[in-house]
Amino acid sequence: MSKEERIVELLEELVKWAKVTGFTQVKNLLLKILPSPEERIAYQSSDGERTGRDVAEIAKVSQPTVTKWWKIWIKAGIADPVKVQRGERAKHLFSLDDFGIEVPVIEPMTTEGSGSGENET
């Protein structure tokens, strides 16, 4: 086995150990930082592609709330910043499903029965 192959083998083993030993800490951090259903939905929806407005609509919160959450998540290390033309978005680093953290499903908004017709905003 070459020196490079041995280094790769050791790094792969370190990654395995890091995953196992860090699992509980990461799960606890996610639960602490994402206590509400809306925060979990917003976090899981923050893929770096969706805008703050898109994530806000999915989570049923305001766009400034999403922007505030993104800053908290990036600072806490559970999301990466994604530079875009008009600022910064966040991309979640962890799937909540992988940690057994439930992400509620919010039913899509419909105009049926709302009485306001197609011009609803």
Image (spheres, helix red, strand yellow):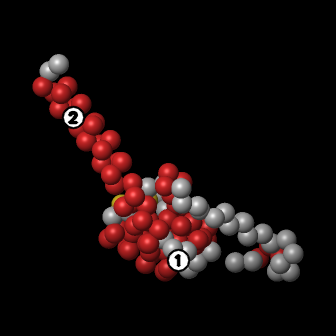
Quadrant of the rendering where the C terminus is positioned? bottom right
Residue 52 x %, y %: 50, 70
Q: Dot 2 corresponds to which residue?
A: 10
Q: Is residue 36 visible?
A: yes
| Closer-to-camera residue (15/20) | 20
User: How many badges with numbers are in the image?
Assistant: 2
Residue 20 x %, y %: 36, 48
Residue type at the position of mark 1: Gln
Circle 1/circle 2 CB separation < 8 Å: no
Of the numbered discs 1 and 2, the one sitting upstream in the chain is: 2
Label 1's element?
helix
Query: On screen, 48 above or below 12?
Result: below
Residue type at the position of mark 2: Leu
Q: Is residue 50 visible?
A: no
Q: Residue at x 85, y 71 (%)?
A: 112
Foreground: disc 1 or disc 2: 2
Q: Residue at x 33, y 64 (%)?
A: 77
Label 2's element?
helix
Question: From the viewer's perspective, is 75 left or right of 110?
Answer: left
Residue 106 x %, y %: 68, 67
Query: On screen, 4 above or below 48?
Result: above
Residue 97 x %, y %: 54, 54
Q: Residue at x 34, y 69 (%)?
A: 76
Question: From the viewer's perspective, is 27 left or right of 9?
Answer: right
Residue 12 falls in image quadrant: top left
- Label annotation for residue 100: none
Alpha-carbon span between mark 1 and mark 2: 44 Å
Quadrant of the rendering where the N terminus is positioned? top left
| Closer-to-camera residue (42/81) | 42
Query: On screen, 74 above or below 62?
Result: above
Residue 67 falls in image quadrant: bottom left
Q: Dot 1 corresponds to which residue?
A: 63
